[in-house]
Image (cartoon, helix red, strand yellow):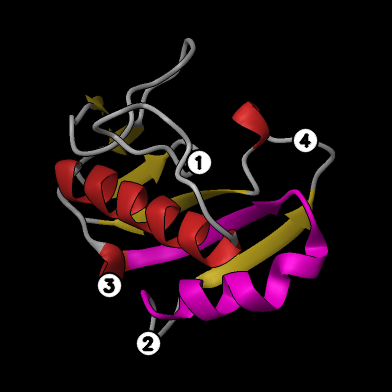
Amino acid sequence: MRQIIKTEKAPGAIGPYSQGVQYDNKLVFTSGQIPLDPKTGQLVEGDIKAQTKQVMENLKAVLEAGGSNMKKVIKCTVFLADMNDFAAMNEAYGEYFQQAPPARSAFQVAKLPKDAKIEIEAIAEI
């Protein structure tokens, strides 16, 4: 059984998708989060570290709305507009996973929605 996750603490969907889906009261799958401020709907200003922190806060909000949290993340996928931002992204990302970090993949992509520098999706247990 799946349940749609919706929270005002993260940016609303800007297309035909959900912020996240809770599956069988066991797993949470988040949609990719870009660095949008949930209050304004605008891309946050700043470098890759600032954008990564906003993305992580958005992920945190979706996970919590789905009954999970950052400590229960199993896998993240990171999409970067520029792989040269990897080290700085990794530094900001690492602040959220200081112990027992999840599995992760990272890719450079041609373009992200709203010209964001980063997008991250996560899978977590409940």
Q: Depth-wise, is mark 1 or mark 2 nearer the camera?
A: 1
Q: Position of residue 11 (x, y in %)?
A: 33, 31
Residue type indicated by callout 4: Lys
Residue highlighted by disc 1: 34
Residue type indicated by callout 1: Ile
Residue highlighted by disc 4: 111
Q: Depth-wise, is mark 1 or mark 3 nearer the camera?
A: 1
Distance (Cα) linking label 3 and label 2: 9 Å
Distance (Cα) linking label 1 and label 2: 22 Å
Q: Position of residue 86 (x, y in %)?
A: 71, 71
For the point 36% across and 89% down, which residue is it? 99
Residue 47 is at least partly visible in this image: yes
> Which one is earlier in the sequence, the residue at label 3 or at label 2?
3
Q: Is residue 65 above or below residue 21?
A: below
Residue highlighted by disc 3: 71
Is residue 79 shown in magenta?
yes
Q: Depth-wise, is mark 4 or mark 2 nearer the camera?
A: 4
Numbered disc 4: secondary structure: loop
Residue type indicated by callout 3: Lys
Distance (Cα) linking label 4 and label 2: 29 Å
Q: Is residue 111 above or below residue 95?
A: above
Label 1 close to label 4 by CB (< 8 Å): no
Q: Which residues are magenta?
A: 73-96
